[in-house]
Image (cartoon, grey):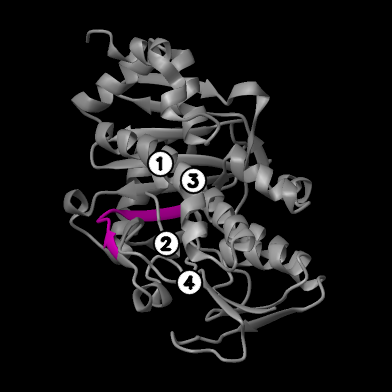
Amino acid sequence: MKILIVGAGITGLSCALRLLRMGHRVTVAEKLRGPIDRVCGEGILPFGRKLLAELDLEETVAGAGKRFYGIAYHGVGRQVEARFKDGEHGIGISRGRLDAILRRACQIEAGFTLWEGRRIVPGPVPEFDRVLAADGIRSRWGSAHGRRARFGTRLGLRFRLNVAPPNHVSVHFFRGYEIYLTPVGPNELSVAMLIDPVRSRMSGARLTDRCITRFREAFPQWRDLEVKDPATRGPISARPEGRPDMHLLGDAYRAFDPISGAGMSFGMLCAKMAALHLDDPRAYYASLKPALRSITCTTEAVLFFRGGGFRTGLMMRQLAGAPVTFQHLLALHDGRRHLGHLGLPALLPLLRPW
C-alpha cells in the first residue's frame, strides 16, 4: 500500500518507520528542511521508551540523550520527588537529535521517500492509498476533516544549558509560570518555561529576555551559563472537538499542555495505533482513549494546582505526606495504572486535612 504522511516530526517519522517494516511504501512530506527542533519538554516517559524499544531504537536514543528515573516538584518552599515504579525510566533527548535518529532509521528501509520543503494542501491525493496527518497543533488537514480545536492560551519558551543535570525531571512552580528541567545529555539540561500570557503582558523578544531573566533569578547557580537555542511557541495545547474522518496523529489530534511531559510519548503511541488500525479511523481513535483519559486526568489536576499560591502549597503538602501515592499517580500518568485501579487506600492520604 502507498501511504502519504503529512509532517516529518517525531510522530510522523515513528509512524513511517512502523509502516515501512510492515511492507508498505511510505512518503513523508514536510514543509521544513532538515531535522526539526521544535519547542517541547524533550522528555520521553517510560511508556514512550517502550515504544522506542519496539522500533529497536531505545539504546540508540538513550546513547544520544540521558535516562531519568522520576519526577520532582518544587514550590512554595517544598520539594517532593517520586521515582517511577518497578525500576522504570524515561529518556531525555533534544528534539533535533531524536528527529535525526528517526530519519536515519527510515532512510535505510526500502520504500521510503522524504519530500522536504513541500507543503501538501488538504484535498484528494490520488497517487496514494492512504493519507495520515501529523502536521502539528494547527493541523490544516485536521481542520479540513472535521477536527475542531480549543487552543490553550499559555506560551512556551525552551532553551538549553551545558551543565551536569540530575537523574530526574524537575518542575518548579512560580506565580504565573513554571520551569520544567529535563536532562537531555551527560552535560546538557533542557529548560522549558510555561508562561501565562495574561501575567506576562509581553511577547516576542521582550518575553524571551524577561523569561531568561526570571530563570537566572530563580537559579542563581546557573546565572553565568550561556543560554543555547532559545525558541518560543504558542499556543502549546489544544483540546479536540468534533469527529475527524481521517487519522490525525500526535499534536494534530490532541496537544497536551507541556507540563504533562507526555507530548512525544503520546505522539509515538498515535503512530503505533495508526499503523495497527490503518483501515479504520474509528478503531484508531478508540484505541487512544485509555491513554487520553490517564494523561488528561493527571495533567488537568496539575494545571489546577499550579500558580505558586495556596493551591500549589496544598498540592505540595499533600504529596509530601503521601510519597507512595505520588508514585501511584506517576504510574497513572504513564498509563500503567488506571484511576479505578488505584483504589481508596492509595488516594485517601491525599484527602487528609490541611
Distance, label 4 to label 2, CA atoms, is 9 Å
Q: Are marks 1 and 3 in contact (CB under 8 Å)?
A: no
Residue 60: x, y in percent?
77, 50
Pointer 2 with pointer 1, Cβ within 8 A: no
Locate residue 332, reporting x and y percent: 47, 30
Question: Which comes before the other along the chain, label 4 or label 3?
Answer: 4
- Quick one: quadrant of the N terminus? bottom right
Residue displayed at 43% across by 38% down: 294
Q: CA distance from mark 2 to mark 1?
A: 14 Å
N-terminal of the pair, mark 3 or mark 2, is: 2
Mark 1 → mark 3, Cα distance in angstroms: 13 Å
Q: CA distance from mark 3 to mark 2?
A: 14 Å
Q: Which residue is mark 3?
A: 262
Q: Which residue is mark 2?
A: 253
Between residues 225 and 36, which one lies in front from this camera angle? 36
Res 24 quadrant in image:
bottom right
